[in-house]
Each structure stands twice: as structure tokens, then as C-alpha cells.
Image (tube, rainbow, N blue to C red):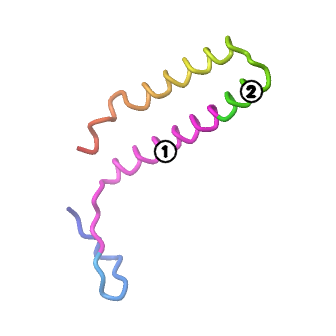
Amino acid sequence: MEQDEGNNNNGAMFVKVMTDDQMEILRKQIAIYATICEQLVDLHKSLTSHHDLAGWALQLLLNLELCRALFDGTENNFG
């Protein structure tokens, strides 16, 4: 673990638990989750107003592909 010597606050020491690369991956994952949440809200609004099953199925497939893209090659970066 790295110690961040430049961030002393009243004598407290902070320790980095993630690398900068891991932090960047986490930021990207959070952004993707936010996008998925927004899409699910839109999907729910669409379903409750139009009962469009074909549109629902397409949105579900797109969200599943987005989830797969999120975890391809990134799932082992924190272990």
C-alpha cells in the first residue's frame, strides 16, 4: 500500500488502497451504472405509458450488452 504523504490532516495519515488505474476503472463503471439506471427509468416510463413489449425487449437486450461490456476484462482488476 502506498502512503500519501502530502495529505496529512491534523497528524492523520491517509493510505491509498486503490491504484490510479483502478480508480479510473471504478469511475467508468459508476458512469455505466448511472447510464443503465437512466435507461431503466426511461424503460419503465415507456412500459407504463405504452405497454410496448417489443421496445421493452430491445431495451433489455441493450442493457444486458452494456452490462457484459462493463465486466469484460475488468472484473479481476480489484482482486
Q: Which residue corresponds to the image point at 54% horizontal and 17% vertical from the top-left?
A: 61
Amino acid beneath label 1: Ile
Q: Where is the C terminus found, in terms of image quarters?
A: top left
Vertical placement of 4 versus 42: above or below? below
2 and 30: which one is in front? 30
68 drawn magenta: no
Query: Which residue is labeled 1 in the image?
Result: 30
Could you say where residue 4 lies in the image, as x and y percent from the top left? Answer: 29, 71
Could you say where residue 44 lies in the image, as x and y percent from the top left? Answer: 68, 30
Q: Is residue 27 left or right of residue 59?
A: left
Amino acid beneath label 2: Thr
Could you say where residue 58 lies in the image, as x and y percent from the top left? Answer: 62, 15
Closest to the camera, between mark 2 and mark 1, is 2
Q: Which residue corresponds to the image point at 50% horizontal and 26% vertical from the top-left?
A: 66
Q: Which residue corresponds to the image point at 66% horizontal and 35% vertical from the top-left?
A: 41
Query: Which residue is labeled 2 in the image?
Result: 48
The segment highlighted magenta reads: 14-40
The image quadrant that residue 12 belongs to is bottom left
Task: Report the number of numbered marks.
Answer: 2
Magenta highlight: main SS = helix
31 drawn magenta: yes
